[in-house]
Image (tube, coloured by chain):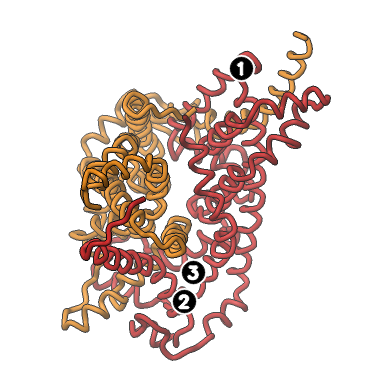
Chain colours: A red, B orange
Amino acid sequence: MVRDRTFWSRAFDVANIVILGLITLSCLYPLWYTFCLSISNKSAANAGLVTFYPIGFSLVSYKEIISDIKFFNSFWISIQRTILGTGISLLVGIMMAYPLSKSKDEFRARDIIMWLLIFCMLFNGGLIPWYITVRNYGLLDTIWALVLAGGLPIFNTILIMNFFRSLPKDIEEAAVIDGAGPWRILFGIVVPCSIPVIATITLFVGVYHWNEFFHGLVLMSDATKYPLQTYIQQLVVSIPTNTSLTPDQYKRLSELSNQSLNAAKVFIAMIPMLIVYPFLQRYFVAGIMLGAIKE
Amino acid sequence: MKGKRGNVEKHYYLMVLPGLVWLFLFSIVPMVGIVMAFQDYNPGLGIFGSEWIGLENFRYLMQLDDSKQVIINTLIISSGKIVLNLLIPLIFALLLNEVTQLQYKKLVQTIVYLPHFISWVIMASIVINIFGYRGAINTIRGWFGLEPRLFMADPSIFRQLVIGTDVWKSFGFNAVIFLAALTSINPNLYEAATIDGTNRWQRTWYVTLPELKSTIVLLGVLGLGNILNAGFDQVYNLYNPLVYSTGDILDTWIYRLGLTNLQFSLATAAGLFKSVVSFVLITISYVLAYKFADYKIF
């Protein structure tokens, strides 16, 4: 592309880089702020002295977490949920997406199933019927409520299906001639050819399971069964919703909390995300585009 | 040959079976529970024993002052989000597109996507810290001699806070689709425009924006379908009883009605109202998206 070399054009470039830099820093600041709070002295954190850097360096919060069995327990529940939930969703989604990527001639039930999926994606029974159903299955207080109750991730299945459709037909035909059956073709050829989209969906489903707090809140009556996000929600964010508060009471309530300990818990909850993200990040832009936009 | 095809098809049915069972158990069975909206549901009697009362629950809901306020809040918060979540990512994508240093561009992109992947529980606790009485914003206000404010307990700014933090959390990720659309613009158009003596601003206005028009229309139309979804996770984690008057949305209200106050039938009726209206709106928005932007989900 031809570039301008005029003064105003260059001035814009400089201003643009500065503005984008500030915007970028604004996305990092909350993480940095939380980190600073977590390693600051408890009283400095509670007094609101921490703004841009830690004050009164102290690792007491992290020491306290190490001896907190409840925290590790919920951390472990979240890990189990994320691994089981992502694995099952992905497997079921891939198995469903493959036949649906075929034409109506090859798989006659395709259109009916497709319409059923779209209907279930757009319409649901609402919170209470859903809750009562899960309760009737006897899933309350089990990990399976967390893993399965969110339902089949239909939109992700459609993304995978769209990607499968864009693969060249010739590879599959060659495999058929070599005597490969449908399962062999799916897991031996189609899936390995679809790594970008599968990595993207893995990231999305994994992040969903890791971040989800509501199912833990509603479906677990026993607080020791809470996944990490629900544990943190109850501890850090939750304010009694049924009582009437005055602004003064609200203020006192929020001042009661141990800022640096809470910040440390929040920060630790972010770490798995921060570790996995860079590895999958390079895939997801390509993955979204390939799944979402078709020629 | 025909027999062989049937054989392959049998495996296809096996492949979709687990998904269909899952769909049945967790999507279709709960739909049966919708009948509660037309009953005076009694947990002891179940949906087969409870008394039928027709549309009484809906009539009662319409009379509540809460329901009107909640619908107004939902519409204000989500329309604010729809407009700004379109505009800010667009501007951001255009600015980022003007950056010629590739590495800087990549770095910016990687970092601004990040907040999208952090849960609202975590983000809300950070937002509450930053906007708290002794948080960073009040500390900075103090430097200018301003009194600290109780931001999180102030109904007059709660909506702005919700919209603002949502846009901040997701603008980077929402820009992905614009950035992708920008890369697919034919460079010849810019060459031609340059030869015609246009400057950068004119090229953005007369080439880039018209080329992005269909993407903008598409995202706007799809957003409209979700106007009753103002973001449960965010509001639930940010609000408190002091800001119910401006911050309570349909989803949080249904949650309190049903699972906190145990008004199962009323909450189901409110949920059904929301599901039906959303279903109609989303269907319309998909039809429009197909018509104007040639968008198909499958």
**SS of the residue under disc 2:** helix
Query: Measured from the top left, where is residue B75 in percent x and y?
Result: 24, 42
**In 3D space, how far apart are the residues under numbered discs 2 and 1 (Cα atoms)?**
53 Å
Q: Earlier in the sequence, mark 3 or mark 1?
A: 1
Q: Quadrant of residue B26?
A: top right
Q: Name the residue located 44 percent from the left edge and 63 percent from the top edge.
A: B111
Amino acid, disc 1 = Ala
| Disc on res. B51 | none
Query: In terms of depth relative to the viewer, which is nearer, B207 or A124?
Result: B207
In three-dimensional space, the C-alpha distance between marks 3 and 1, rounded to whole angstroms, equals: 47 Å
x and y percent of residue A55 in the render?
A: 41, 88
Q: Secondary structure at mark 1?
A: loop
Element type where label 3 sits in the image: helix
Chain to which mark 2 belongs: A
Mark 3, other Cα within 10 Å: few <14 / some 14–19 / many ≥20: many
Q: Determine the residue positioned at 83% across, 24% down.
A: A179
**Do discs 3 and 1 share a chain?**
yes
- In the image, A291 versus A232, the foreground residue is A291
Look at mark 3 in the image and give the residue it sits on: A266
Q: Which residue is mark 1?
A: A109
**Residue B47: image location, x then y, percent:** 48, 29
Q: Which residue is mark 2?
A: A35
